[in-house]
Image (cartoon, grey):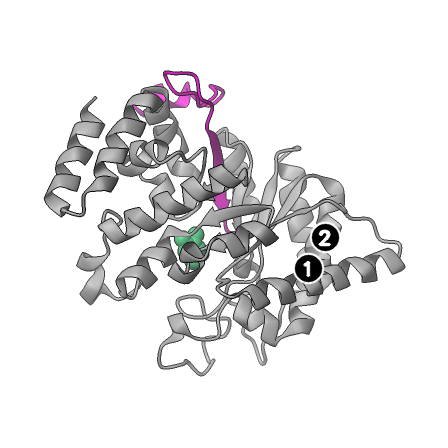
Amino acid sequence: ARKKLGKLKKTRAVTLDGVEITLLANIELPDDCGPAMESGANGVGLFRSEFLFMGRIGEKLHLPTETEQFASYKQAVVAMKGRPVTIRTLDVGADKPLDANEQTALNPALGRRAIRYCLAEPHLFITQLRAILRASAFGPVKLLIPMLAHAFEIDQTLTIITQAKQQLREEKIKFDEAMQIGAMIEIPAAALALPMFIKRMDFLSIGTNDLIQYTLAIDRVDHEVSHLYNPLHPAVLFLLSSVIAMGRKAGIPVSVCGEMAGDVKYTRLLLGMGLLEFSMDPIHLLAVKQEILNSDLEALTTQTKKILRTTEPSAIAAAMIQMRAA
Ligand code: PEP
Ligand code: MG
């Protein structure tokens, strides 16, 4: 089966009724661009930049400098040969501690992580933004901000980006003036108050890993509750479909970059919700592409509407089986 999938590398991901889907890769380090290109990805939908910052504990915490970060981002941009690279700003805390010696909060997943951390450490944030902006001179770069929930966080973030750009202009350092800026939708509050994101952002990317964690109140790294982690919970489906539909209505691109996007079990459901962009670990990309090639979008749209009309898990499960059988 693997050999057969291999043949799909250069095939465009088009549904049976002719709709083209964008398939992107999730990466952790620039070297992951090799496998991403190998899989035939249309670009990088999620570069988890925190991996450049983690595991650097020596005598004292040594964080990558602007020059080091720039070299890594540029390496990814060059390796992707003109395909867009979506770089997510530092998402540390909770299951991704910057420093193993760090004092952990009682509820790290609800604590000062991701954008909250960056806004509390503006020097660290502006250093990263400058490095990302500098890489944008070498190919298409998009900037993705994790864990936003409040309008003022978006506005503060945009102000710091403006400052970083102004510094570079004054130093006559090149960058892409039109670099797109997007938000991760991974906190239920963000999904439920989407217009404030649509108004301020160029694109959205749904992080199902955290969205499910926070919607269902289950720690994503706690094995004792992992049986409760269910992407098909009707509340999760409601949030997902509403974000995708509102984004499409507003004409703002929406992708899914959580693990759900790379799980072939959910490909048809996400297609049926109207999702046009999937970002995943490249190892899953060809299997998802194959599923898309065998899918009739119009039929899936009807079947998905039926799923979204019920909150009965047994009815959802039955409809999912029917959907995958076609
Ligand atoms: C997510 O939350 O779905 C996501 C893509 O981000 P991460 O897994 O890095 O938290
Ligand atoms: Mg996340």
User: Magenta: predominant secondary structure element?
Assistant: loop
Say whether marks 1 and 2 touch (CB < 8 Å): yes
Q: x and y percent of residue 318 in the render?
A: 12, 36
Residue at the farthest left position:
314
Q: Magenta stretch: residue 4 in it?
A: yes
123 up-or-down from 254: above or below: below
Tag 2: residue type? Leu
Position of the N terminus by quadrant: top left
Q: x and y percent of residue 122 in the render?
A: 66, 72
Q: Nearer the viewer, residue 279 or 56?
A: 279
Q: Residues within 10 Å of mark 1 (few under 14, many from 20)?
A: many
Q: Residue at x 43, y 20 (%)?
A: 14
Position of the C terminus by quadrant: top left
The residue wearing badge 2 is 133
19 up-or-down from 56: above or below: above
Q: Residue at x 21, y 29 (%)?
A: 323
The residue wearing badge 1 is 129
The answer to whether residue 15 shows anywhere in this view is yes
Q: Is residue 104 left or right of residue 67?
A: left
Circle 2 sits in a helix, a strand or a loop, which is it?
helix
Q: For residue 141, which quarter of the picture?
A: top right
Tag 1: residue type? Leu
How many numbered discs sit on the rendered protein? 2
Q: Residue at x 22, y 34 (%)?
A: 306
Specify the segment rendered in magenta: 1-28
Q: Nearer the viewer, residue 198 or 37?
A: 198
Q: Magenta stretch: residue 300 in it?
A: no
